[in-house]
Amino acid sequence: MQPYLEKTYLQSVGRNNGTDIYQLAGGNFTNRYYIISNQGTRKLLASPEVIGYDSYIAMCGATSDTLGWLKQQNAVGSCADIMTILRGGLNYPLEECCFRNGIHVKNMDFISCERVIRNNQITGLDIRYTKLSAPKDVTLMIGDIIASGETLARCIRYIIAEFKRLGGSVRRLVFFTIGGTRAIELFEELTPEFRFHWPEFEGITCIFYEGIFSAYQDKGVTGISWPQIDFFWKDGVISPEFRSYVLADDDALFEKCIIYDGGARRYEIPDHYHEVTEYWENIRAAAPNFRFKDFLDEKLGYPTPISYDSWLELNHYRKLDKNAMNELYAQEKAFADKSQNLDIVEIADRRLGEFRDALKEYV
């Protein structure tokens, strides 16, 4: 478990329309961290077949519902500026969802910061384009994927420097993310930097879709995972609804990554197709080199079997409804039990067939 997640727990704080809203409580945080769960984002993160404009639409319900709830809580006001980190950030429907909730968007700003990847490792970052206004006392709203956090850290520090240079100021930052545990550590580091320049800075509100995921630190049990890039459950905090949704499907847990490449599955669909099919082909080839039980435990996030009390603590669920957690634990135990004797080659062949059929018009 990440040190800054120790003793934390999920607390249900609201439901707006079809979106369940949880707050990460119990930590010594400067900022506020929420996990939201909605039918659209559950399907998006469990199914790499959701692509193109459908991947954008899948995020609208959760985003709009949460912005409406945040407005009720006075965590956002009646206006905001949207900063888009180009490519992945374009997936987030912030402008449309602000409009739905009567939040006036005064400025739309852009920054391009792309990862340089060699041999499955991030070797650098490149800011190539910016368009940035810098008003005073602004609520800045951003949506992006956070894995290693290096892209975000560079972008935020660039934004701070530009706002300072141009005479602007930031009142609060609202961040929507399909993101990993590094996001919390990074935002806790960045808040003092905001307050150094603007003591009136109110803090960061970070909203995670479906969970605070973890990025692989190595190539994993299979030997083919991408360190610092691929998301999975281990050492994260996952919404109960998403766990249940994934466990109701035979194969969703075993995908390469929660989101794959968010930009590719929206804008470069043939590249997304090749990444998914390459993963399952590589899994098939690597099957003789790992035990399926180890793969299952890695994906669930703990060695099976596990006691109910340990499961509650590990997943940060100890403050949630006991009846619902008993049902979820039973579902997860049943999934683990039935999966012990699965054949990963059969799963790979099935997923390859399903994915190729679903996306054959793109290749």
Image (tube, helix red, strand yellow):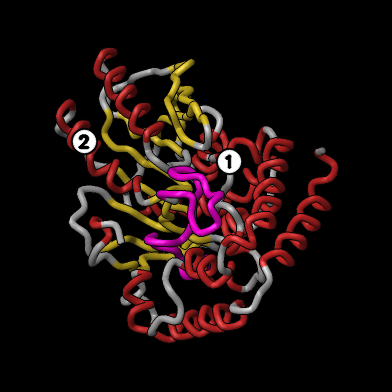
Q: Position of residue 58 (x, y in %)?
A: 62, 51
Question: Taking the image as drawn, is residue 139 in sight?
Answer: yes
Q: Which residue corresponds to mark 1? A: 261
Label 1 sits on what residue type? Asp
Residue lying at the far top in this picture: please name it. 166
Residue lying at the far front in this picture: please name it. 289
Magenta span of residues? 217-242
The residue depicted at 22 percent of the width and 60 percent of the height is 27
Which sits in the foreground, 310 or 349?
Answer: 349
Q: Which mark is residue 133?
A: none
| Left or right: residue 182 compared with residue 4 | right
Label 2 sits on what residue type? Phe
Q: Quadrant of the N terminus?
A: bottom left
Q: Quadrant of the C terminus?
A: top right
The residue depicted at 58 percent of the width and 55 percent of the height is 45
Q: Secondary structure at mark 2?
A: loop
| Left or right: residue 48 compared with residue 115 | right
Sequence-first disc among 2 and 1: 2
Q: Which of the 4 image quarters holds residue 335?
A: bottom right
| Left or right: residue 206 compared with residue 269 | left
Q: Is residue 158 above or below residue 207?
A: above
Q: Secondary structure at mark 1?
A: loop
Q: Which mark is residue 201?
A: 2
Q: Residues within 10 Å of mark 1 (few under 14, many from 20)?
A: some
Q: Position of residue 273 (x, y in %)?
A: 72, 43
Q: Is residue 357 above or below residue 240?
A: above
The reply to whether the magenta stretch includes residue 220 is: yes
Which circle, 2 or 1, is nearer the viewer? 1
Q: Residues within 10 Å of mark 2 (few under 14, many from 20)?
A: many
The residue depicted at 36 percent of the width and 47 percent of the height is 206
Give how far apart the Cα atoms at labels 2 and 1 are: 33 Å
